[in-house]
Amino acid sequence: MALLVKKFGGSSVATPEKILAVAQRVLNEKKPDDKVVIVVSAMGDTTDELISLANAIADPACNNSREMDMLLSTGEQISISLLAMAFTKLGQPAVSLTGYQAGIESNTAYGKGKILRITPRRVISELATGKIVVVAGFQGVTPDGDIITLGRGGSDTSAVALAGALQADVCEIFTDVDGIYSSDPRIVNTAKKMKEITYNEMLEMARLGAGVMQPRSVEMGKHYGVPVHVRSTFTQNIGTIIREEYTVEEKEFIIRGVTHDTNVAKIAVLGVPDRPGVAYTIFSNLAAANIDVDMIVQSVRSTQNNIIDMVFTVAQPDLIEAKKIVEKIGKDMETVGVIVEKNVAKVSVVGAGMLGNPGIAANMFGALAEARINIEAISTSEISISCLIQSSKVKEAVNAIHNRFFSEKHDTVC
Ligand code: ADP
Ligand code: ASP
Ligand code: MG
């Protein structure tokens, strides 16, 4: 007997036919004793459509975050009930549960909730009666009983967290690609499929824009030690396993992937007084508003008037709020002004093997230089290097960097 959690993304359940096909596939693969939990996303582009609907009514100057979550959570409720009906039609008892009913508790950060705890009592009791349990992804409940959503792509996190809480044997993420590639296969047609990747490298790739998995879901997999199998809904192919360590010993991967993120905005605070505590004031206020800051560049001091420029990036949905905050601080500090720019993107290389392998950064910059792409900011972690560029150049940049690291000669992916 196995306990399996299977997550189906929006494109996998986009139409009634696809929902029936998902139910049929699950039943074809289910052994009689298996206990199966399905986590499902909203159908197709439903979440985007709900956002457009809200934008047609809501006043952007008002804080609608609670109502947005109430609205967006309905997308997943449509698909869980329909999928449960599809199982029933095929003769398999099934029950749909909302995040709340499945015991998924989250903090009160509307639109970007973090799962705090899962108490899957109801899931376990329904499984014990022989039902397939279909859980709404992307949603949880706050301590006050409000519905919260877990950020775009949050159904991945619901699935992996549930798999962890239930001590499932594996969490399968069914999607529209047949695994994790060295780069987004929609952008780089020479991208190579991986057999496996470590949690740490996948987390970095996801954090830096590889949208195939929500970063938090990879953290959850690592936390619980649940193997995550990313594979296609539409083929039977084995996909990519995300796990703690590689099992293929001889592989010494240097670079595992090239990612891009266009959901980025740049904020420049100009003419900031160069004195202790300034960076603390800016970034602690952003942190208090739950805004993640990424690349940070501080210019050298202007000798004439002891001022500096502070440039950093945030996710685009945080731009309006972040701008408001820095403008207010800027007034108090008497800075020269705040400039924001949305037409930027981040391209990154990721790989644990870059530790102790000098020259990776130079190679990446060389690829961009050859493609005549200007670098506006650079940031590094132990296992990644990122460059901020103009978003119009992103496809060219990712392909140039990918060619550099994944040509036949340097083929490091299996
Ligand atoms: P779902 O709706 O199933 O959650 P997503 O659209 O969120 O699907 O994720 C799948 C998409 O992720 C793929 O279609 C692909 O374009 C994109 N993607 C980005 N980077 C990668 C990568 N490195 N490997 C595979 N897919 C990637
Ligand atoms: N439906 C949500 C989204 O589009 C969650 C998900 O698909 O994982 O982001
Ligand atoms: Mg997704």
Image (spheres, helix red, strand yellow):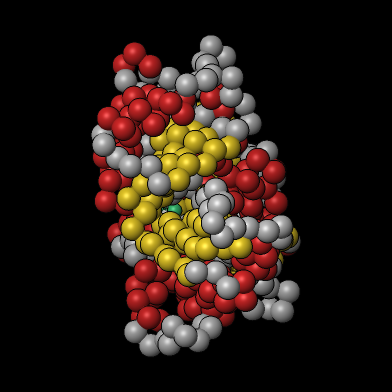
Viewer-proximal residue, 50 or 32? 50
Viewer-proximal residue, 20 or 405? 405
Question: Where residue 388 sits: x, y (%)?
Answer: 41, 46
From where the camera sits, is residue 247 visible? no
Quadrant of the snapshot with the N terminus:
top right
Query: How many numbered marks appear?
Result: 0
Residue at (33, 29) in percent of width and height: 367
Is 98 located above or below residue 247 in the figure? below
Question: Where residue 269 sits: x, y (%)?
Answer: 51, 63
Residue at (58, 44) in percent of width and height: 218
Viewer-proximal residue, 174 or 125? 174
Is 108 located above or below residue 354 in the figure? below
Quadrant of the snapshot with the C terminus:
top left
**Picture quadrant of residue 147:** bottom right
Residue at (40, 46) in percent of width and height: 376
Judged left or right of residue 239, residue 380 is right
**Picture quadrant of residue 372:** top left
From where the camera sits, is residue 53 visible? yes
Residue at (31, 62) in percent of width and height: 15
Question: Where residue 28 sits: x, y (%)?
Answer: 43, 44
Viewer-proximal residue, 274 or 29? 274
Judged left or right of residue 306, residue 21 is left
**Picture quadrant of residue 287:** bottom right
Question: Where residue 267 sits: x, y (%)?
Answer: 47, 61
